[in-house]
């Protein structure tokens, strides 16, 4: 392989990994933008989505393409309901607690969720047998892994749909108004708590979708969320907290960064590289790369 | 003064209890709790007093621990001197990170410290020729050698840990009452107002972060000799950083005894869950996480405030204040 090929392959791999980061980051940033809350338990909702998808896939014939992908929509819907319950049970009351208790609450939920998964499902690594795992398409001398490529495509589609929802629907307009100023929005007759509940449901639903999309090629285990969510945190800060479209670019950028470091330096340093990029952005442009001043969403 | 006296009396009680207790396992659980409380107390210098939640404090545990051990094992530098160099290294790192990140607030600061901690961990794992990478460094010894911080009896580390804890607690009490403490408290209520009143906000925050790092590092050096093994994924891991922040906030950040209550709570749940369900099943983690959720939902200010509310609900209570509220 010549130098151009190595570079192109690394960029393609990075973009495809970045697709999942993007899907996780979109929900995270939606919640931050609208509710001003960093959900440290987001990774555990991804893990839960993966377990739900694995259980659903076990019901049908998993060893086919459709057998592994039909679970995506039900898993997303189930997780959206979980998200709404999460809001009603915990976040609704925690909204007035202030920043530190909210961080503590979601961290506690994150740790507790990992423990719960271990108690209920054991700590072994699960992978549903399926034809996607390891499959690749060759285009010229570059190959695309099928599973990550599907996740990437869905991530882009979801971004476009989310952008449309935020721009054009009644909910989207309400959400943007609440993000701008809760007081003003409520004065105009918008039910902020309803917006918060729907926002949480969408965010957790999307991370459930992400979970269903990664089970064909990624092991499911209690701590799996941490593999994705830490990068997603960095992605949303790099993109600008609150910017939903930016989150996608942030996720893709970090995926590429990881893959380039792994290709040219050392795979051990791929984590360090994205953190250094993150710290550099934080210092030079703390509002994020894709954020224009104070406006959010 | 009165408070310092109380701390010393409590210290003496715990010291004699630890020496008299025959059960080595219980003493080592208590030692872990005491080290954790030292870190929680140190974390409070910045986190509790100024409200900036650091999620990277384990780097200040790992760096002095590694510096001390490596200088000792590779260059035969005495651990006492090595500890000083290690603490200096932690403070230098805190100064750099603090200067860079402390103009950030809220979740930005938390995520920045989380990232800094992760960089430290991945560098320790990557430069494995120096640090032995993920396999860690064992510290083995068969004889007592106080000048090398090597003790065969776990009670020695217990005494070190509770002495550190008493010292850090007295120190924190002094800081709260000092000019610096009032500056930090002013910053917590409003940075803009503090700056307008002439507080050099950035300088005070960096100073608080460095102090916090130095005290954390002090605990880290002794802790690694107590454990007898430098495990990078534990010492520099996110889990430890989160644990330090968690026990401080769960205990109650306005209270001098907050982190101690938090650490005792954490270690006792851990020990009980492990005794009943075994260490591998995930029960300990689940109970810990869910009880943190329950505590936050009951009273987001933490256990000490819950205790205070319960106390005030007693109708004919004697007129003593159980609280040691600093600020």
Image (cartoon, coloured by chain):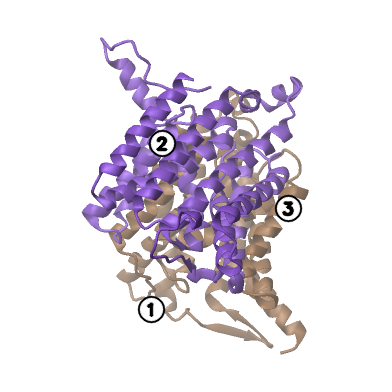
In the depicted structure, whether residue A234 falls above or below residue B16? below
Q: Earlier in the sequence, mark 3 or mark 1?
A: 1
Q: Nearer the viewer, residue A199 or A37?
A: A37
The residue tagged with tag 2: helix, strand or loop? helix
Q: Quadrant of residue B79?
A: bottom right
Which residue was labeled with disc 3?
Answer: A281
Inter-mark Cα distance, 2 to 1: 49 Å
Q: Which residue is at the front of the view, A35 or B107?
A: B107
In the rendered image of the structure, the colour used to display chain B is purple
Measuring from the top left, give residue B152's x and y in whole percent: 36, 58
Q: Is residue A138 above or below residue B326?
A: below
Which color has been applied to chain A in this rendered view? brown
* Foreground tag (2 vs 3): 2
Q: Which residue is mark 2?
A: B260
Chain at numbered mark 1: A
Q: Which residue carries the number 1 mark?
A: A129
Residue A92 in the image, given as x and y percentages of width and height: 44, 34
Residue beneath the point at 41% across and 67% down: A220
Left or right: A253 with respect to A118? right
Name the image quarter holding the C terminus of chain A.
top right
Does residue A40 appear in this view?
A: no
Residue at 60% in and 34% down: A178
Residue A112 to residue A134: above or below? above
């Amino acid at each position: 392989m010549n130098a151009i090929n190595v570079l192109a392959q690394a960029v393609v791999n990075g973009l495809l990994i970045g697709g999942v980061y993007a899907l996780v980051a979109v929900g995270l940033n939606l919640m931050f933008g609208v509710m001003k809350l960093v959900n440290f338990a987001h990774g555990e909702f991804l893990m839960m989505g993966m377990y739900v998808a694995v259980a659903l896939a076990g019901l049908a014939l998993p060893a086919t393409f459709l057998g592994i992908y039909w679970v995506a929509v039900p898993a997303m819907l189930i997780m959206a309901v979980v998200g709404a319950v999460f809001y009603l049970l915990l976040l609704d009351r925690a909204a007035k607690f202030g920043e530190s208790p909210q961080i503590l609450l979601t961290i506690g939920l994150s740790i507790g969720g990992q423990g719960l998964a271990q108690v209920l499902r054991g700590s072994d690594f699960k992978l549903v047998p399926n034809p996607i795992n390891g499959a690749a398409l060759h285009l010229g001398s570059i190959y695309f892994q099928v599973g990550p490529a599907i996740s990437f495509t869905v991530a882009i589609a979801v971004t476009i749909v989310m952008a449309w929802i935020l721009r054009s629907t009644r909910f989207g307009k309400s959400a943007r108004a609440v993000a701008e100023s809760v007081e003003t929005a409520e004065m105009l007759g918008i039910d902020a708590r309803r917006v918060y509940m729907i926002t949480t449901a969408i965010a957790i639903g999307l991370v459930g979708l992400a979970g269903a999309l990664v089970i064909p090629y990624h092991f499911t285990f209690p701590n799996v969320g941490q593999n994705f969510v830490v990068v997603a945190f960095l992605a949303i800060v790099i993109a600008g907290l609150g910017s939903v479209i930016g989150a996608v670019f942030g996720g893709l950028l970090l995926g590429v960064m990881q893959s380039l470091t792994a290709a040219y330096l050392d795979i051990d340093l791929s984590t360090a590289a994205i953190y250094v990029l993150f710290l550099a952005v934080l210092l030079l442009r703390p509002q994020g790369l894709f954020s224009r001043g104070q406006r959010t969403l | 003064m009165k408070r310092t006296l109380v701390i010393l009396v409590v210290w003496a009680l715990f010291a004699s209890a630890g020496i008299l207790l025959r059960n080595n396992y219980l003493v080592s659980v208590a030692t872990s709790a005491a080290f954790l409380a030292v870190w929680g107390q140190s974390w409070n210098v910045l986190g509790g007093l100024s409200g900036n939640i650091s999620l990277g404090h384990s780097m200040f545990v790992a760096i002095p621990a590694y510096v001390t051990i490596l200088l000792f094992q590779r260059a035969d530098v005495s651990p006492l001197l090595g500890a000083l160099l290690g603490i200096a290294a932690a403070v230098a790192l805190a100064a750099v990170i603090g200067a860079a990140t402390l103009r950030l607030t809220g979740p930005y600061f938390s995520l920045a410290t989380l990232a800094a901690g992760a960089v430290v961990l991945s560098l320790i794992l990557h430069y494995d020729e120096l640090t032995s990478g993920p396999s860690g460094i064992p510290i083995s010894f068969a004889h007592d050698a106080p000048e090398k911080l090597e003790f065969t009896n776990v009670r020695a580390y217990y005494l070190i840990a509770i002495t550190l804890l008493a010292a850090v607690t007295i120190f924190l009490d002094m800081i709260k009452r000092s000019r610096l403490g009032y500056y930090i408290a002013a910053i917590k209520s409003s940075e803009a107002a503090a700056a307008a009143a002439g507080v050099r906000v950035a300088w005070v925050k960096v100073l608080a972060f460095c102090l916090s790092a130095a005290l954390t590092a002090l605990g880290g050096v002794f802790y690694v000799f107590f454990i007898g093994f430098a495990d990078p994924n534990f010492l520099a891991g996110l889990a430890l950083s989160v644990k330090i922040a968690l026990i401080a906030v769960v205990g109650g950040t306005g209270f001098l005894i907050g982190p101690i209550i938090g650490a005792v709570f954490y270690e006792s749940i851990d020990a009980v869950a492990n005794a009943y369900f075994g260490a591998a099943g995930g029960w300990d983690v689940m109970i810990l996480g869910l009880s943190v959720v329950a505590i936050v939902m009951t009273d987001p200010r933490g256990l000490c405030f819950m205790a205070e509310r319960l106390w005030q609900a007693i109708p004919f209570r004697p007129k003593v204040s159980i609280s040691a509220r600093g600020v």
